[in-house]
Image (cartoon, rainbow, N blue to C red):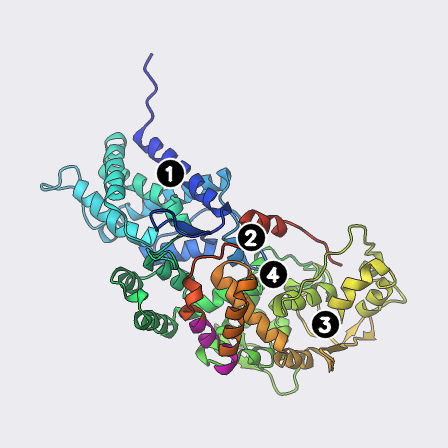
Amino acid sequence: MKPFVRSPLKAAMAGLALAAAAGAALIGAQAAGPNEAGAGPVMVRKLTEDQYRRSIADIFGPGIKVVGRFEPDLRVEGLLAVGTSAVSVTPGGFEQYEAIARGIAGQVTGEAHRAELVGCAPGASDRNGAKCAASFIRRVGLRLYRRPLSAQEVNGLTSVTLAAARELGTFDAGLSATLAGMLASPDFLFRIDRAARSGETVDSWAKASRLSFLLWDTTPDKDLLDAAANGALDTPQGLSRQVDRMIASPRFSEGVRAFFTDMLQLGDIDNLSKDVLIFPAYSTSVAEAMREQTLRTITYLLVDQDRDYRDLFTARQIAMNRLLGPVYDIPVGKQGWYIHEFPAGDPRTGLLTHASLLALHAHPGRTSPTLRGKALREILLCEKVPSPPANVNFAVVQDVNNPTLKTTRARLLAHLDDESCSTCHKITDPLGLGLEQFDGVGQFRTRENGESIDVTGTFEASGYDGAAQLGKLFAGSSQANSCLVRTAWKYAHGREPYGADASDLAALGETFAQQGHRMKALFRALALDPDFYSLAPGGAKPAATLAAGAMHKETTP
């Protein structure tokens, strides 16, 4: 009987699996500072699916396809960006990463791409391909791990490559196996910050990663890695030069899109469902166009035109295409996307009237002032809305055929007779009722079951009549502005701010106001803030606590 011998390939992958588990274990630890050597890991954040896909495209080119399913990203404190520091990879998730990694590695080393992406092969002066493998591992490893590989790492991965090549029969197969292992490594899947020798800030490579994922939502490019290598990121002038370069780049739009996708929870549109018998204008293609519309409008106003953030709530300009024409009751004769401008006085004014938000925060067959009001409170005002009691009776609200309570407003007022419900509904419903002239997919209407729709209300002691006037009040709200600053800070730092961060948030808010509430100025201030590169405070809550809070689910009428 032949003794069991584990293949070098399987052994390599098993070792990387153990390394991933060890990397994930870092997430639960508080960031207390550097280790005794002065360069220990201080914070770990998992790449989101979008960051993973964008990184692969940047490293290997758009011709390499990422095929496979990812575990869902976790939303904590309202943001997936905060969830990245509060989640690890399950065994099933790691198997998915392995499968995706093998698919990518097979393409990179395959006939169609190897000449461009590998660039070398075994030859007369490199019989077994050791030099080629080491060169490839060193070059690609820098981009994948976002730091240089040590000589020990390069030598170890080269040995794995040659062993796998002997077992699998070809050099390319061995190199593919090693690349797959690197793609499944925690050094790629997680952004692992390490402390600089001073022990007060993260090192240059972590600075490059923090900058790139904040401003471009992807892995650092060559210029940024070069600045990390030569120490430029450790000087105010060098850091400022890189920040200005990145904000001036067209890629900054991708970073802004990523931020607002997270903040406005637009990724949830992927799971949006509507009753097409009630809303025949709706389809999954239309839903995707709704999200793209909002993101294009935001980047047009806040990046291309560098306008005041508050204009987002009052602007009559909106991105438009043929798919969305029926939703907005606009005849669209143009191909592709263009910027449409509603006439003055049109009820379609500003972000609050975007179909993406209106459809996302509604039920499959009807509107929901409660869901919409809750979204405005939590997303745009950073308020906490209490969860409803478990035994709430929604029968009155859901009875859309009630002969006496014909409008949603009337049914909600009747629902408020239940004292256990009134506390939350008084917070959410007044704002949501201001959007009731837009149905469950965002189409405009003035009547419900033959009754005129009342869209009046009060916000911050000022009255409004309809979504356009409510948008004006949001534009003038200091709370809405401070909420944006707080959300951007959380997005950048990957955690909720604590007491010691109050002064940093206040200074950031002052800078934002002084610079005319511009997104470019806000992200520049974040990127140049020394606190952005400091070690996480020792008083930070453990990730396990955050994750536990994020898993709480609630139901809303």
Label 4, label 1: how many angstroms apart (C-alpha)? 42 Å
Q: Magenta stretch containing residue 521, yes or no?
A: yes
Q: Earlier in the sequence, mark 3 or mark 2?
A: 3
Farthest top residue? 1
Kind of residue sitting beneath label 4 = Ser
Mark number displayed over residue 431: 3
Q: Secondary structure at mark 1?
A: helix
Q: Which residue is mark 4?
A: 283
Q: Position of residue 30 (x, y in %)?
A: 49, 49
Quarter of the image for residue 320 reads: bottom right
Q: Amino acid at mark 1?
A: Leu
| Mark toward the viewer: 4 or 1 | 1
Q: Secondary structure at mark 3?
A: helix
Instruction: Kindly report which numbered mark, 4 or 2, lies closer to the viewer in this rendering.
Output: 2
- Gap between marks 3 and 4, in whole Å? 27 Å
Residue marked by disc 2: 541
**Residue 289 visible, this angle:** no
The x, y position of residue 63, in whole percent, is 34, 55
Q: Give the residue number, with chain letter if any, for mark 1.
A: 16
Q: Nearer the viewer, mark 3 or mark 2?
A: 2
In terms of sequence position, does the residue under pointer 4 or pointer 1 come before the other? 1
Estimate the spatial distance between the alpha carbons at disc 1 and disc 3, rounded to whole Å: 51 Å
Distance, label 4 to label 2, CA atoms, is: 42 Å
Q: Could you classify mark 1 by the number of other residues whose Cα lies within 10 Å: few (under 14), some (14-19), or many (20 or more)?
A: some
Magenta segment, which residues?
512-525
Pick whichever, 538 or 332, lies toward us: 538
- Image quarter of residue 61: bottom left
Observer-side mark, 2 or 1, equals 2
Which SS does the magenta portion mostly show?
A: helix
